[in-house]
Amino acid sequence: MRLAIADPPYPPQYSERYDTAAGGTRITMRSRAQRWYGTDRRSGNGKPADVHPAANEWDSPRRHRDLLEQLLDQYDGWAIATTPDGLDHYRPLPIPCRTLAWVKTTGGIPGGHRIRSSWEPVIAYPPRGRRGRAEHGRQVRDVLIAAPGVRNFIGSKPAAWTRWVLDALGYDPETDTVDDLFPGSGAVSAEIARGVLL
């Protein structure tokens, strides 16, 4: 089977702004892609960004939907990492998809809202023939509780995250290939190379 893990720059963040001069509200957009992954931006905590020269294209909701359609066309199974408010950019999801939740024990997604998100969704599309418990053995929990990766890159995933996603896809290191479409820190690719599941 041909599998893929996609951890693209996250969709933009939208918020309401109250413009008292105009007497109403307006919707504003903050680019996560350009802020965390653009060629001229870095995080405020001094960690290096995983630079994507075309990061600004990920501010388009259509670009995220195009990624999903590309994965459906080119892979037997796949997973996409995103944000809670980014899920809408991928909908409607194919029926076999499941939304998994990675709950972070530390940190969280920075933002200006009072409620700080401490979880990230993963859209998983297991290959046909690996979706049922009877077809591929044991079940996989839809929640992982783990600290973020420590590779000093924004968005770095821990080893447990990669093993969990591979397990959800029914990965078989003897027969499957896995493409890490956004290699960033190299953490996901390194865990794929180990070929070890939970």
Image: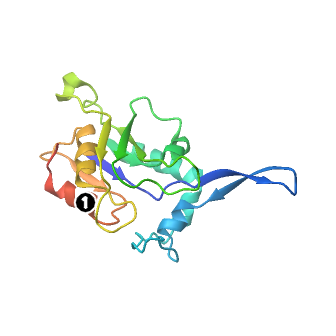
Q: Residue at x 21, y 54 (%)?
A: 192
In the visual, does 66 lie left or right of 106? Answer: right
Residue drawn at (47%, 50%) of the image: 67
Residue 42 visible in image:
yes
Q: Residue furthest bottom?
A: 40
| Outermost top residue | 134
Quadrant hosting residue 122: top left
Lateral position of residue 98 relative to residue 89, left or right? left
Looking at the picture, tell me which residue is in the foreground, 7 or 121: 121
Regarding mark 1 in the picture, which secondary structure is present there?
helix
Task: Please tell me in which quadrant of the rendered image residue 49 appears.
Answer: bottom left
**Residue assigned mark 1:** 189
Which image quarter holds the N terminus? top left
Which is nearer the eye, 26 or 130?
26
Q: Position of residue 109 (x, y in %)?
A: 46, 54
How dense is the environment of label 1, judged by Cα within 10 Å: few (below 14), some, or many (20 and up)?
A: some
Q: Is residue 141 above or below residue 195?
A: above
Taking the image as drawn, is residue 1 in sight?
A: no
Indicate the position of residue 101 as horizontal and vertical percent values.
37, 40
Q: Residue 19 at what x, y percent from top left?
A: 81, 55
Looking at this view, name the residue that lies furthest to the left. 174
Most extreme residue toward the front, as rendered? 114
Residue at 27% over, 57% down: 188
Query: Tag 1: residue type?
Result: Ser
Q: Residue at x 40, y 34 (%)?
A: 97
